[in-house]
Image (cartoon, grey):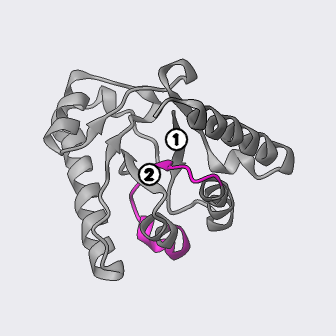
Amino acid sequence: MIFRNDDLSFTSSAWHFKRVNDLFKKYGLKHHVAVLFENLFDNYEVADLLVGEENIVVNWHGWSWKHLKYGEMPYEHIVGDMRKSIDYWNTIAKRRYNSDKKIERCYPTWHCISDDFKRASEDCGLIFDPRKELDEGVFVFHSWGYIRDEKFKQLEEWLIIHKERESQKPK
């Protein structure tokens, strides 16, 4: 099961993001984050968490925080935004943090997929992952949707259930 936190960007609240990530750390779980990269490093607190927290897996969700439908765009635009994001991430993560953490997967915005999108993902060295439903092994959420205590407790309950299920699997 992948827990995928969508739409993290430079506009995201570091406090909310850290609060959610602390839950993942508490239960020893990977926290997959689908990032919109434009101006990301302008939000130092969010960038610090993305680069510095070992349990966070950084994934591509788009360049622009405007939520473009990449599956409806030509290959050149898609691959251009992917490469721009990868270069931006690699350059600043290395320069500012001396980190080699890489962008791993590619999750399309609005779950909008095309052959050009798949090819761009492959050409950029990203794992294309179109899954979006629980029965496909992914739980998609937004950290900003869990700021109220009752929703936050619900997320924690899901993480506990997942951790218990994982511990019961044969090794």
| Left or right: 68 in relation to 98 | right
Q: Earlier in the sequence, mark 2 or mark 1?
A: 1
Residue at x 67% of width, y 55% of height: 23
- The image quadrant of residue 91 is bottom left
- The image quadrant of residue 134 is top right
Give residue 61's mark: none
Q: In this view, does 130 lie above or below 120?
A: above
Q: Is residue 61 above or below residue 37?
A: above
The amino acid type of the residue labelled 1 equals Arg
The residue that label 1 is drawn on is 4
Kindly state the secondary structure of the residue where label 2 is placed: strand
The residue that label 2 is drawn on is 35
Percent position of residue 72, x then y: 31, 26
Instruction: Indicate whether residue 1 is drawn in magenta.
Output: no
Residue at x 30% of width, y 79% of height: 98
Query: What span is in magenta?
Result: 27-46
Q: Pointers 2 and 1 in contact (CB under 8 A)?
A: no
Percent position of residue 111, x then y: 43, 27
Q: Residues within 10 Å of mark 2 (few under 14, many from 20)?
A: many
Percent position of residue 22, x then y: 65, 61
- Residue that protrudes farthest toward the right in the picture: 150
Kindly state the secondary structure of the residue where label 1 is placed: strand
Residue at x 82% of width, y 50% of height: 148
- The image quadrant of residue 158 is top right
| Left or right: 84 in relation to 18 | left
Instruction: Indicate whether residue 30 is drawn in magenta.
Output: yes
Percent position of residue 135, x then y: 54, 18
| Left or right: 166 in relation to 48 | right
The CA distance from mark 2 to mark 1 is 10 Å
